[in-house]
Image: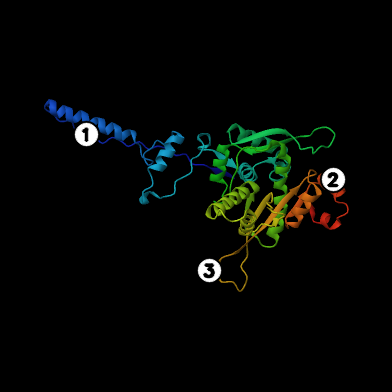
Amino acid sequence: MRHHIPRDISRPRMPEASHATPQLAPSPVDQRHDDLAARAENRRALQVSPASRDRSRPEHPREARQRNVNCNHPMDQRPRRQAIAPQAIGLSLREEERKVLTEVGRFRVITTRDLAETIYGNRQSRMERDLAFLRGKGLVQVDSVNARRDGRGGRIERIEVVTLTKDGRAVARQTSGLRQDQKLYAGMVKPREVEHDAQIYRACLKEAERIERKGGTNLRVRLDFELKSQIQKAIYANRKANPERGMDEIKQQVARQFDLPFVDGGIQIPDARIEYDLPRKDDQEIDQGPRTSHEDIEVLTAAYRPGHLRKKAQAGFHVYASPSDRATLTAKIEGDHRLMERILEL
């Protein structure tokens, strides 16, 4: 199945028929008046309104900023369509291609190995053709990076990862069908941590399966980038409102606000949070809507120190680790069997 992004076609206004009639030569005063009127008309023509703008031409950011400044009238509060990348206008996407844009946008970075397994059923050649198509359209970026080694010896492994471009993020927003409050990402951050970040995708898939088995629906993923930004804004707002309050008191309040644990003087933030709706109970009023809940996820690596690992476990996060990392962590906390039982395998 292909998802078609419609082309916006400019429809020029057809000139109306006119019948020329003989006219007398204008006087100098009339000629001057006509010249001034023509100049005013030209100035108005340069101030093109959003409705009459040539939509075949990409809008310059400066024009967008000026239009936003000039469109604050209460009568002009209609929702506007999000701009589509020029190379994506009229583009048809296969279901797998649309899914790639959606998943990579939600998790920022995913390995090609995981995409081949979860979206393409291990059909490697088909995935490679789709990625080549999306890359040719400027929607995705495919990079080969060094895997994280954490000081371990041996040959450095290279992994291939996919991220969205800004145009790819715009197309994903148009075609994904995700909730409007689902944040989408573009570009790679912290290349040295890319292996850890890519594992978040696998951990969230496993957690999503468990959530759906108990009836959870309408899932939304919030990565630590989003959570950290909102927490910092909340701390700043509380501190600005009352500068006399202690920082620990403010952090504890913000931790309660976001339903996050406050451990050893700090707010524990997971790698990802999955928010979802639960079915209504039999005795729940229909107009109250579904109940909401969330699960916090942390991906452990061999670089975690025992103390850091215990904080994450104490926070109540669902912790995951790859088989190789789990073996290394077992050696670090071999005396704490209860802690090891809580580490789920990716």
- Residue 67, position as x, y percentages in the image: 40, 40
Q: Residue beneath label 2, please?
A: 328
* Any part of residue 178 in sight: no
Q: Amino acid at mark 2?
A: Thr
* Mark found first going from the N terminus, 2 or 3: 3
Q: CA distance from mark 2 to mark 3?
A: 51 Å
Asked which quadrant contains residue 13, the reply is top left
Q: Amino acid at mark 3?
A: Asp
* Mark found first going from the N terminus, 3 or 1: 1
Position of 9 compared to 187: left or right?
left
Q: Amino acid at mark 1?
A: Ser
The dot on residue 287 is 3
Along the line of sight, the residue nearer the viewer: 5 or 293:
293
Q: CA distance from mark 1 to mark 2?
A: 86 Å
Residue at disc 1, secondary structure = loop
Residue at disc 3, secondary structure = helix
Asked which quadrant contains residue 64, the reply is top left
In this view, the mark in front (2 or 3): 2
Q: CA distance from mark 3 to mark 1?
A: 61 Å
